[in-house]
Image (tube, grey):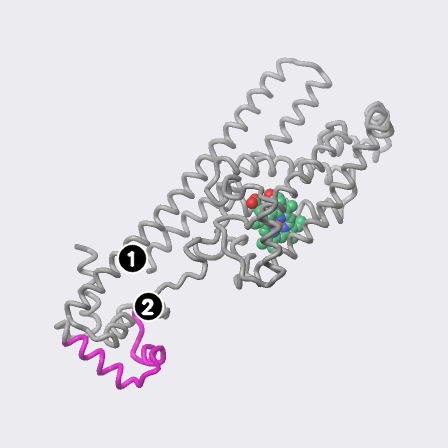
Amino acid sequence: MGRAPSLKTDPAGGVKPPVWDPLVRLSHWLVALAVLVNGLIDKPGAALHVGLGWAVLAIVLVRLGWGFVGPATARFASFPPAPFKALSHLGGLARRQRPREYPSHNPAGAMMVYTLWALLLTVTLTGLVMTGGRSPMTIAADQAAVNSGDWSALVKQAPAEDDEGDSDGGKIVGAIHETAANLLLILAALHVGGVVVESRALGRNLVRPMLGRGKA
Amino acid sequence: MKLPRFAKDAGRRQSAALAAVVLVQAVAALFFMGDAAADIDLDGLGPESAVEALVSLALVLGIVTSGWQLRRTLETVQSQAQALEVARGALAEVIEAQFTRWALTPAERDVALFALKGLDVAEIATLRGAATGTVRAQMTRVYAKAGVSGRAQFAALFVEDLLG
Ligand code: HEM
C-alpha cells in the first residue's frame, strides 16, 4: 500500500536477481558457522572438530546433489564455471561499471563457490584420512576413557597413528588439511569482501536474499 | 493484496522446515553410516550389519523423499506467485480498459488508481504534489463519470468483475 502505480522500470534488463531457496540458505549458514568454529575456535582433533567436519561433509554433499535437482537458482547449470567471464566481471567492477544482474551467481561468485566447495571437500576428506575414519562418537568415547585414566584407548589408536600420523604420507595429508583450511578462511573473508563490493556496485544488499528476505 | 501473502508465508515456512529436515537427515545418515562402518571394521559383518544397512537405506530414501518434497513445495510457491502476477496483470488491464471507456483524463486516471489502492485524499495529494481540494474535485468527477456515489461503490465495481 502507498506505492505509486508506477510503470515498472527494470534496471536489471529483465533478469530477475536470485532469491536463494531455503536449502541453499540454511546449508550456507551452517557451513559458514562450522568453518569459523573449526578454523578459529575449537581444538583440532577434538570430537567437536571432527563432528563438525562430518556435518559439513554431509551438508556439502546435499548441496552438491541439490545442484542437479534443485530449483533453477541453485543449479550448476545456472552458474557454469567461466574463468574469463569472471575476470571480465572483476575488471568491470574495478572500472566502477555497474555490473549486470545474473539469474544465479555472477561469474566471479560462481568461481568462488566452486573453489570453496573444492576446499571444503579437501579439508573434510583429508580430515577423515587423518583420523583413520574414526567417528566423532568413537573419538569422544576414547577421549572420555583417557580422561578417566584408561590409557588403553591410546594404545588402540596407536597403530592408526602409525600409518597416518607420523609417516610421510600422514604428514603430507596433515599439511594439505591445514593449508586447505587456511585457504578456506582467507577465501571466505575475500568472499564476504566480494559481497560488500558487489552490493555497492549493484546498489542492492546481497545479504538480504541470503537471509530469505526480498520478494519471492 | 493481503490474502495471497498468507499462502506464500505458509509455503515459505513449509519449505524452510523441509530444508532443515533434509540437512538434519543427511548429517544423521552420515554419522550413522560412519558408525556402522566402524562396527563392521571392528567385528566383521554380522546380523547387526544387515539391520544397519537397512536403516542406512531408509535414511537415504528419507533424504531423497524430503528433497523431492522440498522441490515440489518450491515449485508450488513459485507457480502461485506467477498466477497472482497474471491475475494482477489481468486486473490492471480491466481497470485500464474501464478508465478508457469512462474517458478519464490522465490526471483522473492517476487519482482513480490511487483511490482504488486505498489511499486517502491527503495521501494522494501529497503523492501528486497537488492541493487536497484539487484531488477531491478530481475524485468527484471520476465518481460522476463512473456513475457511482463514492469510493466504496467505485471499488466494488472492480471487485464485482473479479468475483464474476
Ligand atoms: C556476508 C554475507 C554472506 C553472503 C551474502 C554470502 C553468500 C553466499 C552465497 C550466495 C554462496 C553460494 C551458496 C550456494 O550456492 O550454495 C556462498 C557460499 C559460501 N559461503 Fe557465503 N555468504 C556470506 C557470508 C559468509 C561467511 C561469513 C562465511 C564464513 C565462513 C561464508 C562462507 C561460505 C562458504 C564456505 C561457501 C561455500 C559453501 C556453501 O555455502 O555451500 N559466507 N555464500
Q: Residues within 10 Å of mark 2 (few under 14, many from 20)?
A: few
Question: Disc 2 is attached to a residue of which chain?
Answer: A
Residue at 58%, 53% in the rendered image: A89
Tell me the magenta residue range: B118-144
Determine the image quadrant of residue A114. Answer: top right
Q: Which mark is residue A120?
A: none
Q: Which residue is mark 2?
A: A5
Q: Nearer the viewer, residue B88 or A144?
A: B88
Q: Position of residue B15 (x, y in %)?
A: 46, 44
Q: In the image, what residue type sits under mark 2?
A: Pro
Residue at 50%, 51% in the rendered image: A102
Q: Nearer the viewer, residue A146 or B93?
A: B93
Is B158 in the magenta? no
Q: Determine whether the residue tagged by mark 1 lies in a helix, strand or loop.
A: helix
Residue at 62%, 17% in the rendered image: B49
- Distance from the alpha carbon under mark 1 to that under mark 2: 12 Å
Q: Determine whether the residue tagged by mark 2 lies in a helix, strand or loop.
A: loop
Residue at 39%, 64% in the rendered image: A9
- Evaluate whether residue A54 shows in this view: yes
Q: Position of residue B19 (x, y in %)?
A: 51, 42
Determine the image quadrant of residue A121. Answer: top right
Is B133 in the magenta? yes
Q: Position of residue A30 (x, y in %)?
A: 62, 45
- Does residue A161 lie above or below B161 as drawn? above
Give the number of marks: 2
Q: Main secondary structure of the magenta part?
A: helix
Question: Disc 1 is attached to a residue of which chain?
Answer: B
Q: Nearer the viewer, residue A84 or A19?
A: A84
Q: Which residue is mark 1?
A: B88
